[in-house]
Image (spheres, helix red, strand yellow):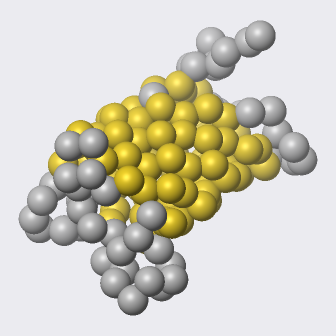
């Protein structure tokens, strides 16, 4: 889960959002499926499902990059040009001995030029995660 600032590279209309995501067991090497939702308020949200590549160091640092095709519901939020968006991010985190992680993520959301209007937006997210075992 996390809290994010949206439109961080835009000098206007910065907003806060909440995020919840789940990462699943790796399918190969350090590559794992993930899904998440980011809710920005004013009934604007992004639902994403994709892949994340994570490398854990022995010292506790964790580096991740991720990508996901996403569904964007504008509501009262920023016009991103369409409902199909792509979310990519880079993340650095610190894993504690109990496997809880605090992380900082920089992400970009864009329709990748599939629509003629493609302003995109960036977000900066502070996250906290913990393992769930079934």
**47 to 74, vertically: above or below:** above
Name the residue: 23% across, 55% down: 77
Q: Position of residue 117 (x, y in %)?
A: 34, 84
Q: Is residue 120 visible?
A: no
Viewer-closest of 33 and 61: 33
Q: Quadrant of the C terminus?
A: top right
Q: Position of residue 20 (x, y in %)?
A: 47, 32
Q: Quadrant of the N terminus?
A: top left
Name the residue: 50% across, 56% down: 71
Total residue callouts: 0
**32 to 10, vertically: above or below:** above
Instruction: Tell which residue pokes out farthest to the left in this image.
Output: 12
Q: Position of residue 123 (x, y in %)?
A: 34, 55
Left or right placement of residue 25 versus residue 41 in this view: right
Left or right placement of residue 64 versus residue 119 in this view: right
Instruction: Tell which residue pokes out farthest to the right in this image.
Output: 28
Q: Is residue 84 visible?
A: yes
Name the residue: 73% across, 44% down: 33
Viewer-closest of 22 and 30: 22
Q: Position of residue 19 (x, y in %)?
A: 41, 36
Name the residue: 39% across, 89% down: 116
Viewer-closest of 120 and 71: 71
**38 to 77, vertically: above or below:** above
């Amino acid at each position: 889960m996390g809290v994010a600032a949206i439109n961080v590279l835009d000098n206007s209309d910065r907003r806060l959002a909440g995020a919840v995501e789940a990462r699943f067991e790796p399918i190969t090497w350090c590559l794992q499926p993930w899904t998440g939702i980011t809710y920005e308020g004013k009934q604007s949200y992004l639902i994403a499902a994709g892949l994340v590549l994570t490398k854990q160091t022995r010292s506790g640092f964790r580096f991740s990059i991720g990508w996901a095709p996403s569904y964007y519901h504008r509501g009262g939020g920023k016009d991103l040009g369409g409902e199909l968006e792509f979310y990519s991010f880079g993340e650095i985190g610190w894993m504690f001995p109990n496997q809880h992680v605090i992380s900082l993520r920089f992400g970009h959301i864009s329709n990748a030029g599939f629509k003629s209007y493609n302003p995109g937006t960036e977000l900066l997210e502070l996250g906290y995660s913990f393992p769930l075992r079934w």
